[in-house]
Image (tube, grey):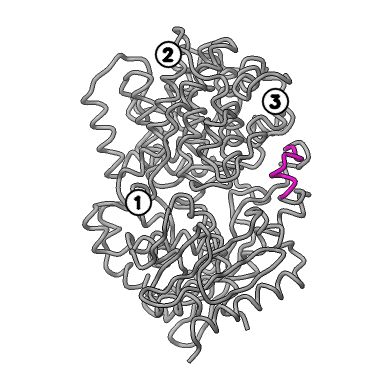
């Protein structure tokens, strides 16, 4: 392994990983990830930008290889990947892990190619987990750099390439080329295009599609740079301020970043989750809380939550939403989410419909939300570092660190919050949530999310039940099309 | 009325205290930017202050220095940010904050903005 490039090491991992090499706990998390991602795609397909993307792709027409989710209309693999990955991020309703929002490429890419090739459930799961593991590591390698979070859209390039490469049964040389081809066009998301308008949906769809195409080109002999990741004029050097190149293959097969997965139970940025949990706790104890009688809502949040909210502010006001006809910025707005949750008593995709986002009552209540940068909540995030024995960051930068040194099962990457609601009559309601629901340490089965979103698009109940039963034993499925049949409308 | 320089000095005192007392290894987090955060805080049509936040030394002094991170805003914006009324980052999308080379400055800007939001107004 010593003289191999990073892309070659990844290729070796992709070709040689066996289903039986993957711990059962990781496989279980991948199955839950499928349910969570499908729920997000169903919900995203009902949004205005989701509908426009699906309409456009249907108009293109194409070879009938894979399904658009949820309609079941058949199109080419690359169009299905573009549509399903894009629609899935419409509401920011998909999981994330250390480091990246990997599920929304790992799952739709593996399903689309698996459907075309009639792959087994086992092979689809392996491809999905490979994509998670490689995307997460690539994200970590450029952690100290100008892009972050979902703006790391280039992680989906490599995710698409390796998942497709595995399912297409490419050899090491071909997968190395696929990675070289994919990362040669390392696109990232421009923040303004992400924060507010519909174009945010392409954060995942376009790079995933390019990654898949790279695998097909490599299959036919097209070459890419084997040292694309570590070359002095390569990916890490150009994408990071301080490249952590060694992270790209750190403990591959020995440590599983899929262990750190955080599922989304609510639409919206992860930084919303702690606040949403708090308000739902308050509403559970006080179901008759009248939003008209609220004087002030104070959200004590980590500084990361505040930063994200600050970036959304210019695009989350009513006038701007009308102008861009988009709910997207609201998925990052603490005031909107707190207000709509208190009025509707729930935080689901229904709170982001074209009509709901324009309700002046919600925007008026949102003005009563005050965000306080809370030191203890911010420190909770930092305190997770010593508890999992991450060494001095200088050692990380120097490469004296392996993911094997960390118990990834114990990493907590959720973002907590505290909420105080002051009523006009002087009553005060309080709640806090250190570990948001859906994140490590507070896992909630994704069955409910899947049922909720599948029911909302009128997927027949027998199909919903079949999908839930099938996913539990996906590894026994000889042909993934049996599962696909149960997750689409026709 | 406190001047911007007074606020920056208070921030530096708070950060130095945090470094001395903290159990949470804040210096190590700063070391993620191993050379520290070195910034010219520029006031539009006004003075410039050189602010250094690093584990070895935190200080502010009047005048500019040759550093990559240059942040410019009006004096009233700076004072509002130092009071914790809003973050520095919030002024970027609206154009109230001007950054030279946003792409290469974005992460240290977020780190500095976060530190100021958390610790500038700490009593």
Q: Is residue A401 above or below residue A162?
A: below
Q: Earlier in the sequence, mark 3 or mark 2?
A: 3
The spot of residue A241 in percent (x, y) is 56, 45
Q: Which residue is mark 2?
A: A217
Q: Position of residue A68 (x, y in %)?
A: 35, 26
Q: Which labelled disc corresponds to residue A22?
A: 3
Tell me how far mark 1 sits from mark 3, CA to CA.
Answer: 39 Å
Looking at the image, which residue is at 36% across and 60% down? B93
Q: Which residues are magenta?
A: A394-402
User: Which label number is shown at residue A192?
Assistant: 1
Q: Nearer the viewer, mark 1 or mark 3?
A: 1
**Residue B116 in which image quadrant:** bottom right
Q: CA distance from mark 3 to mark 2?
A: 29 Å
Find residue A9 and report its image quarter: top right
* Residue A239 magenta-highlighted: no
Q: Is residue A157 above or below residue A279?
A: above
């Amino acid at each position: 392994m010593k003289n191999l490039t990073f892309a070659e090491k990844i290729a070796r991992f992709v070709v040689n990983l066996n289903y039986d090499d993957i711990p059962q706990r990781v496989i279980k998390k991948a199955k839950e990830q499928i349910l969570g991602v499908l729920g997000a795609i169903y919900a995203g397909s009902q949004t205005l930008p989701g509908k426009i993307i699906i309409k456009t792709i249907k108009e293109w027409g194409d070879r009938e290889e894979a399904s658009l989710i949820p309609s079941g209309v058949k199109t080419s693999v690359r169009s299905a990947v573009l549509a399903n990955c894009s629609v899935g991020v419409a509401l920011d309703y998909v999981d994330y892990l250390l480091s990246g929002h990997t599920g929304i490429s790992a799952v739709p890419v593996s399903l689309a190619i698996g459907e075309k090739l009639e792959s087994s459930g086992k092979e689809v799961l392996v491809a999905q987990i490979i994509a998670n593991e490689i995307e997460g590591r690539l994200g970590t390698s450029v952690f100290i750099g100008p892009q972050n979070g979902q703006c790391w859209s280039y992680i989906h390039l490599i995710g698409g390439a390796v998942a497709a490469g595995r399912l297409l049964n490419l050899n090491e040389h071909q997968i190395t080329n696929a990675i070289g081809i994919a990362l040669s066009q390392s696109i990232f998301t421009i923040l303004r295009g992400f924060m507010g308008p519909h174009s945010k949906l392409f954060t995942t769809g376009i790079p995933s599609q390019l990654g898949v195409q790279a695998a097909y080109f490599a299959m036919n002999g097209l070459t890419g740079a084997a040292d694309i990741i570590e070359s002095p004029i390569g990916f890490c050097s150009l994408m990071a301020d301080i490249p952590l190149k060694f992270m790209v293959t750190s403990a591959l097969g020995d440590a599983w970043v899929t262990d750190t997965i955080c599922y989304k139970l609510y639409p919206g940025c992860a930084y919303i989750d702690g606040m949403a949990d708090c308000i739902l706790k308050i509403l559970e104890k006080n179901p008759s809380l009248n939003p008209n009688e609220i004087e002030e809502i104070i959200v004590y949040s980590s500084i990361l939550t505040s930063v994200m909210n600050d970036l959304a502010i210019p695009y989350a006001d009513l006038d701007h939403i009308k102008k861009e006809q988009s709910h997207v910025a609201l998925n990052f707005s603490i005031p909107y989410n707190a207000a709509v949750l208190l009025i509707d008593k729930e935080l689901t995709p229904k709170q982001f419909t074209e009509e709901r986002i324009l309700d002046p009552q919600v925007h008026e209540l949102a003005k009563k939300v005050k965000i306080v940068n809370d030191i203890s909540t911010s420190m909770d995030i930092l305190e997770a570092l010593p508890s999992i024995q991450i060494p001095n960051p200088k050692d990380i930068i120097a490469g004296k660190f392996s993911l094997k040194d960390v118990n990834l099962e114990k990493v907590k990457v959720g973002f907590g919050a505290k909420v105080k609601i002051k009523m006009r009559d002087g009553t005060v309601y309080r709640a806090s949530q250190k570990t948001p629901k859906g994140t490590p340490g507070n896992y909630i089965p994704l069955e409910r999310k899947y049922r909720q979103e599948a029911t909302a698009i009128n997927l027949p109940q027998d199909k919903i039940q079949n999908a839930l039963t099938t996913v539990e034993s996906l590894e026994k499925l000889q042909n993934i099309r049996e599962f696909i049949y149960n997750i689409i409308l026709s | 009325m406190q001047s911007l320089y007074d606020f920056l000095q208070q921030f530096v005192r708070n950060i130095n205290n945090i470094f001395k007392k903290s159990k949470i290894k804040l210096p190590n987090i700063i070391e993620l930017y191993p050379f520290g955060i070195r910034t010219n805080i520029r006031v539009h049509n006004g003075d410039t202050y050189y602010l250094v936040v690093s584990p070895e030394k935190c200080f502010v002094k009047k005048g500019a220095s040759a550093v990559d991170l240059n942040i410019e805003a009006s004096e009233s914006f700076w004072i509002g940010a130092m009071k914790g009324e809003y973050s520095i980052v919030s002024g970027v999308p609206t154009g109230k904050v001007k950054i030279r080379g946003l792409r290469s400055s974005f992460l240290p800007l977020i780190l500095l903005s976060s530190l100021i939001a958390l610790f500038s107004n700490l009593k």
